[in-house]
Structure formats: C-alpha cells, structure tokens
Amino acid sequence: MDDNKMAGKVKKPGKRGRKPAKIDLKAKLERSRQSARECRARKKLRYQYLEELVSSKERAICALREELEMYKQWCSAMDQGKIPSEIKALLTGDEQKMPPSGGNKTSKNSKNNISSSNGQS
C-alpha cells in the first residue's frame, strides 16, 4: 500500500517544502551583509567579555601571589623562632590591633575572624 501512495507522488530527494519565490538578489545580499554585521558585533562582545574575564583572573592571581609571599615570610619568621604580629592577632582574635599588611585582608582570614568573633559573643 505504501508503494501505491508513493507511486502517485514522486519527490526529488533533498527538496522539501514549497519552492522559494524568486528572491531579489539585492535583498539577499543586504540580508547577508546584515547577518555578517551582527556576527561581527557578537564576536566583538564575546572577545570583550573574555578579555575582562582574563584581566579579572590575572588580578586574582596577583592577589594570591601576594598572599603566598606573605605566608612564606610568616613561615620563615616562625622558622627563626619569631611569631609575626599578624599571627598573634589571629590567634588572640584581636583584629583591631592587627597592623595593615599590604592593605589587603584576605577573604579567608576575614571569614575566620567573623566566625571566631561570632563564637566569642
């Protein structure tokens, strides 16, 4: 039965649906140009986003390197038998007495100090 149905309608492979009306060549070119403009704009936005992402990651890396250097200095001081004042302040929970080291306080230390101060209240 399927063969009888198909025998009445002979379809060419790869050409489905209705045939497009004759498209004005100028309109087709203009649509192509507009599509290319939009594509370039999306590409530009994507690259701007990626550049901002890279710069933010680079800033984070610099901050982490500074933090690592600070920890190395602390370790070398403790190897010599000295306890840095920052560590003393962390151990005693006196964040107010802590001298500013580099101007940046790490978020990890801030979280620890907040949790320890909440426990002391």
Image: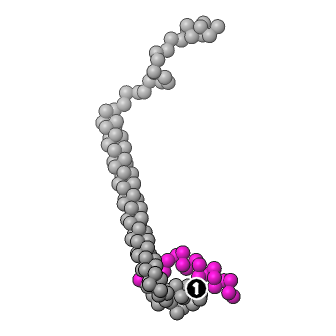
Tell me which residue sits at (31%, 33%) in the image: 25
Q: Residue at x 37, y 27 (%)?
A: 22
| Magenta region includes residue 107 | yes
Report the quarter where the N terminus lies.
top right
Please give the residue where the numbered disc 1 appears in the rendered image: 91
Q: State the residue in front, 89 or 48.
A: 89
Residue 15 on image: x %, y %: 45, 21
- Is residue 32 on the magenta stretch? no
* Label 1 CA crowd tier, 10 Å (few <14, some 14–19, many 20+): few
Boundaries of the magenta span: 102-121
The answer to whether any part of residue 74 appears in the image is no
The image shows residue 104 at horizontal and vertical percentages of 45, 80
Q: Can residue 24 be seen from the camera position used here?
A: yes
Q: Is residue 9 left or right of residue 74?
A: right
- Residue at 36 percent across and 60 percent down: it is 51
Nearer-the-camera pick, 39 or 24: 39
Q: Which of 35 and 98 lies nearest the eye of the viewer?
A: 98
Which x, y percent locates residue 3? 59, 7
Q: Is residue 28 above or below residue 79?
A: above
Q: Secondary structure at mark 1?
A: helix
